């Protein structure tokens, strides 16, 4: 990347006004060396040089758990988009009220009859009502005026979640542990009252204990290190790791926390970027700065699968070096995770991820997957772009295939990402207030889940940025 491109990037991210960076404190986890956990197949572990640690850690934007009301709080959003966004949220919340379980053991829950299977498991597992209800609670609480009586739907959801707590920090009951635990932390953190704060503290400790690290006999040279997965029976992935970082951020955990810095190592290994990622698939790949699903087990990408190359790149033509394709939802997840972990805007990983976003800037699809995971993509996009404190995005031509070529490409006109994301979500809302994806993958044919994703994405659009 040339100096001009970096200056454009630094200007867009408000580098001159960025929070003061703090020196990195070396805080190795006090765990004695252990043999590799017997649940891990050593043949599935790949070793390589670990990614470089940050030289300094910048404090990201603090979590905001309330959406402000009034046009004065949103000077950069067009008035019609602003009004439409609030109306869309209100209609979506009303739909969720109509779908909330009202009685029995599931009272207060959403998607109480739903099932989901992890991407590395062939069978259905326990319902994900706890995780989805936690995100639904967050959607209601973020519209809550401080001091006002709590919405009845939020009250029922909170009661359901607290009934699921084992009193020691675990909300998962053993199923989809990281996914459930992280979602609950984000949901309870939005409540902001003494009754839930102790549950959040215990849940954070439990979530951190689920991370793959030295406690399982792993070292920083191994590609599982620092990641999180659906549970302790399968490999870690970027989707679960970014959910863990979301939860820690929402709970106010500092980026210099050892768990966050261990996660940064795993996140960096999912990036298609030579220099910081020494994996063989990255060395032979596009070097485009985007992210894949997981570096574990040799690497997997759903975009490679969608392109007919196999999830592991195993179907590439004979003689072609194996590589893996970057895609939209994971790139926004990775970009956001780099920022939550305290990387500064001039870090090569952040610059490269941002350029991938500029080359693939769209609201029509999840780049690389079409409409699969579209609402997950919107949610990751909204959190990532707000975390980067940008009011506009200046796209690069999609023909710029790598950070090197992008640095010479001519940018197009700046685009107001909040205006456009609000408009995209408004256009897809159903008359009953719900959203649903015609692509069923990852449960996005379940309107309760996709409606929650859409509301949370709209709320990120309506939260203030650091420069406003």
Image: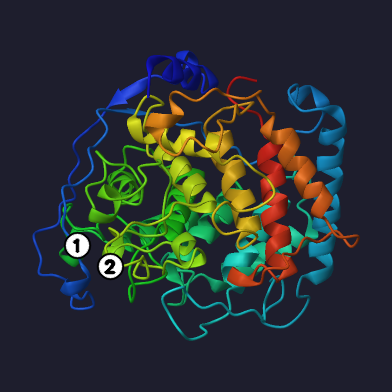
Element class at badge 1 = loop
Element class at badge 2 = helix
The residue identified by callout 2 is 297
Q: Could you say where residue 374 lies in the image, as x and y percent from the top left?
A: 64, 57
Q: Could you say where residue 53 lies in the image, as x and y percent from the top left?
A: 24, 37
Q: Could you say where residue 434 lies in the image, as x and y percent from the top left?
A: 81, 61
Residue in the picture at 62% in, 73% down: 129
The quadrant where residue 148 appears: top right
Vertical side of 110 occupied by 140: above or below: above
Residue that lies at the very extreme toward the right in this rendered image: 431
In the image, 276 versus 222, the foreground residue is 276
Please count the marks in the image.
Answer: 2
Colour scheme employed for the rendering of this structure: rainbow
In the image, 314 versus 447, the foreground residue is 314
- Label 2 crowd bin: few (<14), some (14–19), many (20+), radius 10 Å: some
The residue identified by callout 1 is 46
Whether label 1 touches label 2, CB < 8 Å: yes
In the image, 171 versus 38, the foreground residue is 38
The quadrant where residue 439 appears: bottom right
């Amino acid at each position: 990347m040339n100096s001009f491109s970096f200056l454009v990037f630094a200007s867009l991210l408000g580098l001159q006004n960025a929070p003061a960076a703090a020196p990195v404190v070396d805080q190795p986890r006090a765990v004695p060396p252990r043999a590799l956990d017997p649940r891990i197949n050593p043949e599935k572990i790949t070793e390589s040089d670990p990614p470089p640690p940050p030289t300094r850690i910048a404090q990201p934007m603090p979590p905001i758990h309330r959406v402000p009301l009034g046009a004065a709080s949103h000077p950069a959003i067009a008035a019609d988009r602003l009004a439409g966004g609030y109306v869309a949220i209100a209609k979506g919340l009303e739909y969720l009220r109509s779908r909330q379980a009202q009685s029995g053991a599931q009272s207060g829950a959403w998607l109480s009859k739903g099932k989901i299977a992890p991407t590395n498991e062939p069978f259905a597992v326990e319902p994900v009502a706890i995780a989805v209800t936690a995100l639904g609670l967050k959607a209601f609480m973020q519209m809550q005026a401080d001091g006002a009586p709590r919405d009845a739907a939020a009250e029922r959801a909170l009661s359901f979640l607290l009934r699921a707590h084992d009193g020691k920090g675990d909300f998962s009951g053993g199923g989809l542990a990281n996914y459930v635990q992280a979602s609950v932390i984000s949901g309870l953190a939005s409540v902001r009252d003494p009754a839930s704060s102790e549950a959040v503290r215990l849940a954070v400790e439990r979530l951190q204990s689920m991370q793959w690290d030295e406690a399982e006999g792993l070292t920083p040279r191994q590609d599982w290190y620092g990641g999180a997965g659906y549970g302790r029976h399968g490999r870690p992935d970027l989707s679960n790791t970014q959910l863990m970082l979301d939860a820690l951020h929402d709970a106010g955990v500092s980026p210099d926390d050892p768990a966050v810095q261990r996660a940064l190592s795993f996140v960096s290994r999912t990036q298609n970027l030579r220099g910081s990622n020494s994996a063989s698939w990255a060395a032979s790949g596009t070097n485009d700065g985007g992210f894949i699903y997981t570096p574990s087990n040799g690497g997997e990408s759903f975009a490679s699968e969608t392109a007919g190359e196999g999830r592991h790149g195993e179907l590439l033509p004979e003689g072609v070096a194996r590589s893996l394709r970057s895609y939209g939802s994971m790139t926004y997840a990775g970009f956001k995770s780099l920022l939550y972990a305290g990387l500064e805007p001039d870090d090569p990983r952040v610059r490269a991820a941002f350029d991938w976003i500029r080359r693939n800037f769209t609201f029509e699809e999840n780049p690389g997957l079409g409409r699969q995971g579209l609402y997950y993509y919107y949610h990751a996009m909204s959190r990532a772009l707000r975390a980067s404190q940008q009011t506009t995005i200046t796209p690069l031509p999609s023909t710029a295939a790598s950070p090197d070529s992008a640095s010479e490409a001519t940018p197009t006109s700046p685009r107001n990402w909040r205006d456009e994301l609000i408009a995209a979500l408004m256009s897809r809302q159903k008359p009953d207030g719900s959203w649903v994806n015609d692509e069923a993958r990852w449960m996005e044919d379940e309107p309760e889940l996709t409606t929650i994703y859409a509301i949370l994405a709209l709320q990120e659009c309506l939260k203030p940025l650091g420069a406003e």
